[in-house]
Amino acid sequence: MAFAPTAGLSLKPRHYAEAEACPVVGAQAGLWFEVHPENYMAEGGPRLHWLERIRRARPLSLHGVGLSLAGDERPDRAHLARFRALIDRFEPFVVSEHLAWSRRGGVYHPDLLPIPRNDEMLALVCDHIDEAQSALGRRLLIENPAAYLALTGHDWDEVDFLAEVARRTGCGLLIDVNNVHVSASNMGFSAETWIDAVPAELVGEIHLAGHTPDPVWGERLLIDSHDTPVSEAVWALHARLTDRIGNRPTLIERDGAIPEFAVLLAEQARAAQALAAATRLAA
């Protein structure tokens, strides 16, 4: 399907019918949808049926949460095979995963856990990305995580670490702007400096999401909750990034307190307008 991707939305089952019927006009002309492949690794059923219908109308992106690329165990080959089957079936225009670990000893943890950015971890992550890209037959985009604790053992700046992973493996980067804002607030660094350091040529996709203050610590600890609208601070960082690097497919992520489809489309339209402005600026 030939298309010019602009702003997309996380696809939720309650919105299947509206997503399929959404007209290809205005801000929605470049609308696309992203799903977690782990929710569709089945032999059949209504979810796959709906995804096939939506794929006929719109492009898809597959955003993995289960490969545990930074874990101390090799990527699960059965998981990779199921992931590859979905790629072959739905032909997503982007495939992505996280720079995090979530599996050990056959146990999956309900979060994407952080890592020390050192040379040993760099080599391990690169080996796992190489294996995953080979098995999936696709270039991966790797997402920067949100940070909640100041880990010891870092030898690399985060942006430099991500860029070196990309240089060694040929992967690209998925820049989650909300994660940058959350991490900067929690860890006490400049989100603007982080955004300005990202190599433009490596960025294949951008994520925008909402966050919430921790119930106990308040604004001193922001949580990447994906259950609120995108904040003005995150919109400003997105504009700063796209003004510099140009138009990149930008996703509005919403995983909790899911509103009506029209509410999400309003955020999607704002992102599409920002990307159009970045395109005009580049011209």
Image (spheres, rainbow, N blue to C red):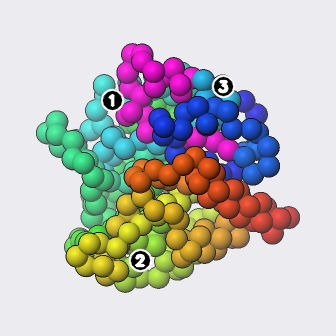
274 relative to 73, above or below:
below
User: Number of numbered discs present?
Assistant: 3
Q: Is residue 3 left or right of residue 268?
A: right
Q: Would you say the residues marked 2 and 1 are in contact, meaning their CB atoms lie under 8 Å apart?
A: no
Q: Which residue is drawn at 37% across and 44% down?
A: 65
User: Which mark is nearer the camera, 1 or 3?
Assistant: 3
> Is residue 189 visible from the viewing direction of this image?
yes
Quadrant of residue 203 within the rendered picture: bottom right
Magenta region, residue range: 31-52
At x 34% / y 57%, what residue is drawn?
122
Q: Of the residues shown, which amino acid type is indicated by label 3?
A: Arg
Q: Read off the residue under disc 1.
A: 79
At label 1, which amino acid type do we have? His
Kind of element beneath mark 2: helix
Please provide percent x and percent y for residue 25.
79, 43
Q: Is residue 47 magenta?
A: yes
Q: Nearer the viewer, residue 68 or 56?
A: 56
Using residue 164 as the reference point, say whether residue 20 is left or right of it: right
Question: Which badge, 1 or 3, comes first in the chain's sequence?
Answer: 3
**Residue bearing the label numbered 2:** 184
In which quadrant will I find the N terminus? top right
Cα distance, mark 3 to mark 2? 40 Å
Q: Mark 3 points at which residue?
A: 56
For mark 3, does the 10 Å Cα neighbourhood hold few (<14), some (14 to 19), or many (20 or more) residues?
few
**From this viewpoint, is residue 158 visible?**
no
Specify the farthest residue to the right.
283
Earlier in the chain: of badge 3 and badge 2, it is 3
Q: Which of 168 and 135 is in front in this view?
A: 135
User: Where residue 212 sits in the image (x, y, percent)?
Assistant: 38, 69
- Secondary structure under tag 1 reads helix
Dot 2 amino acid type = Ala
- Nearer-N-terminus badge (2/1): 1
